[in-house]
Each structure stands twice: as structure tokens, then as C-alpha cells.
Image (cartoon, grey):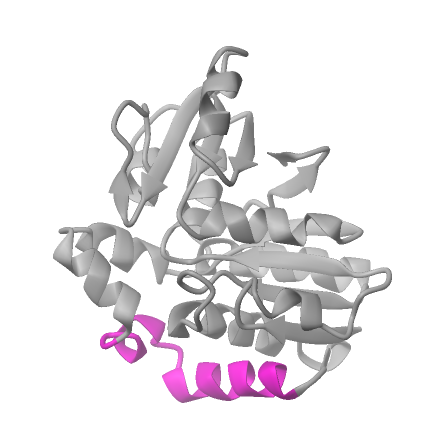
Amino acid sequence: MKIEVSFSPALYPCRTLTRHHTTVAIDVLRATTAVCAAFQAGCREVVPLDSLEALAACRSQGYSAAAERGGHKVEGAEYGNSPTEYMSLDMKGVRLAYSTTNGTVCILHAADADLTLVGAFANLDALCDRLRADQQDTVLLCSGWQNDFCLEDTLVAGAIIERLGDCAQPHGDAAHVALTLWRAAGNNPLEYCAEATHVHRLQGFGAQADIQFAFQLNTCPVVPMLKNGTLVL
């Protein structure tokens, strides 16, 4: 299987793996980590949205609103995108309508793939088990920050490539860069990303617990997949 990396949704249309492929959407700080945490806490389904206007329609259909902009929970939403908040709750049966600055946009960009999965450090091994079993060419789509490169998502991509080992062939320079950066992190991604822009941004909001949780491996062994516009297990 070939593994390609797109550093941001803006670069995703330029990928070379376009036929019969899986795409993994990655936004470790914090959207895809929060999605994994919500499912781990019992959530039934998550509808990713790219606008706040779409939330109202979903709420009228019985969905709870989860929304974030610029790192802050949107006023009037029941939830933001804090994975530690989700992990502290009993979310059994909850249906979320979910909109974030970068992560849900990334997920929706990936919707044209044969299979769209959600990835983070939180579900690293479970995700890699699924990819290894499927043996389908895969694009790792980093959400970045407003279409710009970010270090932490690239590290997740590198960790996935390393975990897949000999059954995966890095395809293109971006995949090799991601793998090189992950190996340079020495299995300590939190320390390696200490000066990363989005880490500093979230620290300014007092979200240190979320940062620490997001860099822990395998805390939420679930693999959310997009089916008919809805994330389910």
C-alpha cells in the first residue's frame, strides 16, 4: 500500500493518490482527538459541519451542538472541542453536530475518498490495525491551521507511517518528511512540539490538559469512519 501525506486541505487536491484510496483526516489539536474521545465516552454519531449556520438545522433534528472557533467554544453550543471534557462525560447515545475551525473542514475535504477515517495519537494503533487490514492506498490529510502547515498533525502522519512498517510504502516527499520528523521526535511528540504555534495558542487559553491528552498514544482505541456524511464506529 502507498501512503501519501497532504500537509493541509489546500494541498489535498494536488495529491497523486486519487483512485481507490482511503483518506485519514488528522487534527490532533483538537478536533479529531475530541471525536475519538466522544466516541470513547459513548457518543452514537458525529456530523461534521463546516459552518455554524448548519448547526441550527441539525439541532432541530435532535443533535447536540458542539462548536469551536479560534480555539474557543462557540456561545450557545453544548460542547466545544475539548477531548478531556468529553472523556469526563457519559455520552452514551449522544448525537453531535460538530463544527470547528480546521478539523471538521479537513474531514469534509476527505469525504471524496472510498473510505474516510479519523486519526490522532489517541487512536494510533487501532487506526493502523484498520489500515493494515484494508491494504488500500492511503492519504494522510493534516488539517494544519487555516490551510497552513502544522507540526503536530505531521507527526501523527509520521507515526502512522512508521507503525505500518513494511506493509506501507511512503509515497512522495511529504510522507518522507513526516516520517523523518516523527523519528526526530524520539517518541516524545509533546516535548518535540513545545514550540509549535498551535501548542502556544492553546496554552494561552489555559488548555494544557487537552494538549497533554492529545499527545498521549492509544487513549481512545476507536476508529471513526465517515458514512453518508456522518461519523460512526
Q: Residue furthest front?
A: 53
The residue drawn where x is 15% and y is 51% is: 205
State the quadrant of the C terminus.
top right
Residue 170 in sight = yes
> Is residue 70 left or right of 157 when viewed as pictured?
left
Q: Residue at x 80, y 73 (%)?
A: 1
Where 40 sits versus 29, above or below? Answer: above
Residue 167 part of the magenta segment: no
Q: Where does the image place residue 71, in percent across and percent down from the top left?
A: 27, 49
Compared to 197, does 30 lie above or below? above
User: Residue 170's spot in the image, x, y percent?
Assistant: 69, 82
Asked where in the image residue 82 lies, by quadrant, the reply is top left
Q: Is residue 117 left or right of residue 86?
A: right
What secondary structure characterizes most of the magenta part? Answer: helix
- 31 is higher (above) or lower (below) than 2: above
Q: Residue at x 69, y 85 (%)?
A: 172
Residue shown at 28%/74% (left/top)?
Answer: 196
| Residue 170 sits above or below residue 34 on the image | below
Residue 11, position as x, y percentages in the image: 60, 70
Describe residue 85's horizontal placement relative to residue 134 as left or right.
Answer: left
Q: Which residues are magenta?
A: 173-195
Q: In the rendered structure, does residue 177 fall within the stretch colored magenta?
A: yes
